[in-house]
Image (tube, rainbow, N blue to C red):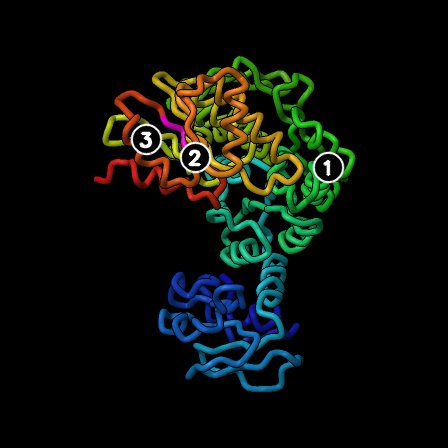
Amino acid sequence: MLTFADVLEALTLQPFEQARQPITDAVVDSRLVIPGALFVALPGERQDGHNFVQDAFQRGAHLALIEHPVETDRPILDLRNPPLHQDLPPLPACLLVEDSLKALQDIARFWRRKLSVKVIGITGSVGKSTTKELIAEVLGRTYSTLKSPGNLNNEIGLPLTILRLSESHQRAVLEMGFYVPGEIAFLCEIALPQIGVVTNVGTVHAERAGSQEAIAEGKSELVQALPPAPEGVAILNMDDPYVRKMAKKTQAKVFFYGLDPQADLWADEIQSFGLEGISFRAHYRNEILHLRVPLLGRHSVHTALRAIAVGLVDGLTWQEIVQGLRSTPIQLRLAVVRTEQGAIILDDSYNAAPESTLAALNLLADLDGRKIAVLGDMLELGLYEVQGHELVGRRAAEVADLLIAVGERGKIIAEAARRAGMPAGAIHEVQDAMQAVPLLKEQLREGDILLVKGSHGMRMDRIVAALEIHE
């Protein structure tokens, strides 16, 4: 477990054997403090973490990283000019640094290098979180495994996750997000992944990155950071041309997965059983396995293949891998809830991109019942905004009996659905999520299947909250 001594050594490059008090956790939100935690005070656009240092101590924090003095009754140890030539204060205490975020990252970098844990890094436009969850389930059957909680996948979240590692952990499964060039390379420099998994390259975040080519280059930073073979392994989606090309950018061993028989691991005979999961045949070397797993939608076969691939390259047996694949419940973002009218809601409201929305519509197509799609704006698509929304609109016309398009960009979805032949009376347009609620309450009936999906900023989750049964 991380200790006060480790924190000091990471920030001053000096060992402090006399400061062995354990640090139980690291957080940037004082409300999440548990006794013995390290609280990192970060300045922000809306809130400055320095205003909550005293609250963190009242909740039991042992240490607070600060970058300017704060009002507190705890001692403040100035670490801005190491080497340190002052007595160590009793805990709880503040550690004054030049930059609290950089200090957090420095501590995580130091701590990672003290551990012998094997790190699996995951990136991609769609499917990172589900892939992370399933890989952790598979590895967790054999190894003591830590995974990124939630979507802590950036320059703040990844260091926080690393500080939760202990000497007892054997594997860490870390999600790595991408917004700007160099970000994943920076995360890899902290985390030192030995296995890298790339899901796909889509259009989400194209507004910031500029193009799919720029997104692909950013995602490829993960495979470029891997150690050479045989220690490093890049697990790549052969079905995605952008990901396939990444094989030329790494010194690691390349392991391809997908639906192409030329891949190292590939699948065929894929069947969807709606909410009961999927089945498929997995091919690896001379082996063929018939598998059924509790994942939703045919597209989820790629998620399963990624988890299998990690298990195989990490030396697990098929029995161990299959046990992990079949474990339930797997924490998926898509949740299934019921309404008072007896309809079923597929709640995929966390986020949306054209690729993930098309996959959700494909799942909707597999289910029995009247199909209703409530689709909101997909944000941050940049140059692909019109194209992406039109693709979704055309597929919605093929799948849905009723379409409710939410937001300004939702109008593009609605218009594309009309052009694709969906009756005008089956298409409704509303400005925001809450305007869809009375319309749905009027329309829903027993046996309906309702898909709710849109970017997080559209707050489509409010539709689900207003319609689901609260017991």
Q: Is residue 432 above or below residue 299?
A: below
Residue at x 46% of width, y 47% of height: 150
Q: What residue type is labelled 1?
A: Glu
Find disc 2 in the rendering and name its residue: 348
Which stretch is magenta?
450-454
Q: Earlier in the sequence, mark 3 or mark 1?
A: 1
Left/right placement of residue 328 relative to residue 351 reads left
Find disc 3 in the rendering and name its residue: 440
Q: What residue type is labelled 3?
A: Leu
User: Is residue 215 within the magenta segment?
Assistant: no
SS label for mark 1: helix
Residue 190: give x, y in percent of width and height: 64, 56
Q: Badge 2, how many Cα within 10 Å: few under 14, some, many 20+?
A: many
Q: Which of marks 2 and 1 is nearer the N terminus?
A: 1
Q: Badge 1, how many Cα within 10 Å: few under 14, some, many 20+?
A: some
Q: Earlier in the sequence, mark 3 or mark 2?
A: 2
Q: Disc 2 to disc 1, how far (Cα)?
A: 27 Å
Q: Disc 3 to disc 2, how far (Cα)?
A: 17 Å
Left/right placement of residue 311 relative to residue 368 reads right
The kind of secondary structure the magenta stretch mainly shows is strand
Relative depth, front residue between 160 and 432: 432
Q: Is residue 3 above or below residue 409?
A: below
Residue at x 53% of width, y 74% of height: 66
Relative depth, front residue between 430 and 126: 430
Find disc 1 in the rendering and name its residue: 213
Residue at x 54% of width, y 47% of height: 172
- Front disc: 3 or 1: 3
Left/right placement of residue 397 relative to residue 263 reads left
Residue at x 47% of width, y 67% of height: 39
Which image quadrant for residue 186?
bottom right
- Front disc: 3 or 2: 3
Q: Which amino acid does label 2 sit on?
A: Asp
